């Protein structure tokens, strides 16, 4: 009997540190049900949105964030629920999913956080996907550097055309 209790304590301890990791990771994590209602909202999302988990839990994503293109996002999620496959959204396709301010306004050059998104199926005990996970990565620095490099390249090409020099 003590082994059972010890195993339960170990399971509880493991669950506790996994939840702590979920809250402290520098990645936005949102879990949605099939109706696009928020089930999980981690500290990253809270910090950047200003919305507490209690403000968003069991509320519809599209009501909370009307900037999310509903028909596009539902179509993007269909394979996640039906085929149990992951999907990806890069900042080059869409600069952001959630319109979060750039949290480095002094050192940053961008108004909004550029985001890469991974959408993952979460399979339940029945084998059915009833939930999906959104993992949001802040790639603002990468996007800003790439945009600056592209602007420099355009300027160099214009200068070459004006001076008649070749690359």
Image (spheres, rainbow, N blue to C red):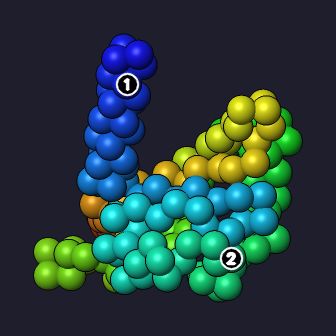
Q: Which residue lies furthest to the right in this view?
A: 82
Q: Can residue 145 be seen in this view?
A: no
Quarter of the image for residue 123 reads: top right
Where is residue 72 shown, x and y percent of the image? Answer: 77, 66
Task: State the residue at coordinates (27%, 53%).
Answer: 24
Image x and y of residue 164, in percent: 35, 60
Q: Position of residue 35 (x, y in %)?
A: 78, 65
Decide if residue 5 is on the left or right side of residue 141: right
Which one is nearer the viewer's eye here, 15 or 130?
15
Query: In the image, 98: left or right of 121?
Result: left
How many residues crowd mark 1 within 10 Å: few (<14), some (14–19), many (20+)?
Answer: few
What residue is at 61 percent from the left and 67 percent from the top? 38
Instruction: Examine the rendered structure and indicate whether residue 1 appears above or below residue 124.
Output: above
Packing grade of label 2 (10 A; few <14, some 14-19, many >=20) is some
27 in relation to 49, above or below: above
Task: Quarter of the image for the N terminus: give it.
Answer: top left
Left or right: 69 as drawn, with respect to 105: right
The image position of residue 100, as x and y in percent, is 41, 78
Q: Name the residue under label 2.
A: 60
Residue closest to the eye, 159 or 49:
49
Residue at (36% x, 14% y) in the render? 3
Q: Residue furthest left?
A: 107
In terms of secondary structure, where does tag 2 sit?
Answer: loop
Label 1 to label 2: alpha-carbon separation: 39 Å
Mark sitting earlier along the chain (1/2): 1
Q: Nearer the viewer, residue 77 or 3?
A: 3
Q: What element carries label 1?
A: helix
The label on residue 166 is none
Q: Residue at x 21, y 82 (%)?
A: 105
Q: What label does residue 5 carry, if any?
A: 1
């Amino acid at each position: 009997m003590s082994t059972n209790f010890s195993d339960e304590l170990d399971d509880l301890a493991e669950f506790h540190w996994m939840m702590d990791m979920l809250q402290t990771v520098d990645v936005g994590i949102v879990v949605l049900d099939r109706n696009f209602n928020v089930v999980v909202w981690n500290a990253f999302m809270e910090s950047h949105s200003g919305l507490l988990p209690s403000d968003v839990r069991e509320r519809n994503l599209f009501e909370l964030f009307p900037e999310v293109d509903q028909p596009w996002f539902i179509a993007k999620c269909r394979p996640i629920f039906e085929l149990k496959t992951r999907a990806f959204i890069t900042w080059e396709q869409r600069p952001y999913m959630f319109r979060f301010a750039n949290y480095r306004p002094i050192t940053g050059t961008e108004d909004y956080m550029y985001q890469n998104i991974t959408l993952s199926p979460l399979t339940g005990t029945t084998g059915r996907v009833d939930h999906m996970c959104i993992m949001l990565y802040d790639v603002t620095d990468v996007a800003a550097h790439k945009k600056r490099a592209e602007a420099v390249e355009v300027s160099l090409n214009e200068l070459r055309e004006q001076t008649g020099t070749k690359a």
